[in-house]
Amino acid sequence: MTHHRPSTLPRVALILFILGIGLASVIYSPASPARAQEPTPSDDQVNVVAKQLYCPVCENVPLDVCPTQACAQWRQTIREKLTAGWSEQEIKNYFVEQYGARVLAAPPARGLSLLVYLLPPLAFVVGAYIVYRAVRTWRRAARPMASLPPAAEDDYTRRIEDELQRRE
Amino acid sequence: MSDTPASPPPSPPARNFGRLLLWGGLAALLALVGFGLYRTQAGPVSSGPAPDFTLTTFDGGTIRLGDLKGQVVVVNFWASWCKPCEEEAATLEAGWQKYRDQGVSFLGVDYVDTEPEARAYLERFGITYPNGPDLGTRISQAFRIRGVPETYFVDRQGTLVRVKIGPIEMNELQSILDPLVKP
């Protein structure tokens, strides 16, 4: 009986083929050009930072949707900083340094701006306490009325009836 | 025998203090909001001592308004994105050329702008007097400007004597500066 031994040549060829494909995919992968040159950030990436900023010229309009030329220039600045590898926080710090803290959508929690963070929860707590006190007062006021004694047992009524009887 | 109904028991001191604190806090908050609204609604500074500031120019130098006492100073707020500013750019440069030897300084304060566009604007209009960004918008807030362009005139004593809202023309510039430069 002859035992059929598969040739090792196809196996080696297969391994080489797989390795070749793997190597080619590494060399020609889409990431390769990115390493050679920083990609330009997309509008979405720019707007992630822009929506956290407000231009003082266009009050109450976030930078990502502001249509003015000034805001377009700011968005371009963000794009340039992102291309240069700046982080989101570094870009925000740059804008604060250039234009003041009022450009931030969320003001820093210090100085007078601290009130923005403290007042709403404080108002909620005070409001909840006032409601609690009011409800408690109403309940107390309602309780004696619900448990009023029958007329015959009412001490005041009894005294009046006694007085009337005495006068008769 | 007394028919007067019994007066209610006095509130405990703690409760009075709490109420006082609550009303005091509310009053302080209202005062703060009122002051903020007043500041927002108040127009530009138009008289009295000119707010002092230090301008870091695009060339890297620093100029302090207080150091220019003895000179007439024209402080112009502008921006590269501001179309009306373009109307007066040439006028201001011409004014600077005319009055620079008569003890007049011109300072350009670039409001909420980006540096490359600001530099291109200065080059485009051939502006040579000192200009710099309004870092942190501190200068514009001190003058309480409402927009650009706005031009402020400071006399030799450092007093703000005139404010021009909007683009300025040469005859108006002359009518303001001529009396100020007279010895």
Image (cartoon, helix red, strand yellow):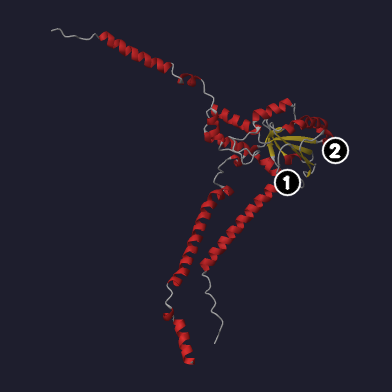
Task: Name above or below for residue A144 compared with residue A31.
Answer: below
Where residue A117 sits: x, y (%)? 53, 49
Residue receiving disc 2: B175
Residue receiving disc 1: B43
Tell me which label, 1 or 2, sits earlier in the chain.
Answer: 1
Badge 1: how crowded within 10 Å, few (<14), some, or many (20+)?
Answer: few
- Residue A90 visible (yes or no): no
Horizontal side, residue B110 vs residue A83: left or right: right
CB-based contact (under 8 Å), mark 1 and mark 2: no
Rendered-image quadrant of the N terminus of chain A: top left
Furthest residue in direction top, as rendered: A2
Report the Cα–Cα distance between label 1 and label 2: 23 Å
Furthest residue in direction left, as rendered: A1
B110 or A134: nearer the viewer: A134
Disc ID at residue A116: none
Task: Name above or below for residue A34 compared with residue A55.
Answer: above
Q: Quadrant of residue B54?
A: top right
A16 or A94: nearer the viewer: A16
Where residue B36 sits: x, y (%)? 65, 50
Q: Are the numbered discs 1 and 2 placed on the same chain, yes or no?
A: yes
Secondary structure beneath dot 1 equals loop
Secondary structure beneath dot 2 equals helix
Chain of the residue displaying label 2: B
Where residue B58 sits: x, y (%)? 68, 31
Q: Quadrant of residue B141?
A: top right
Q: Amino acid at mark 2?
A: Ser
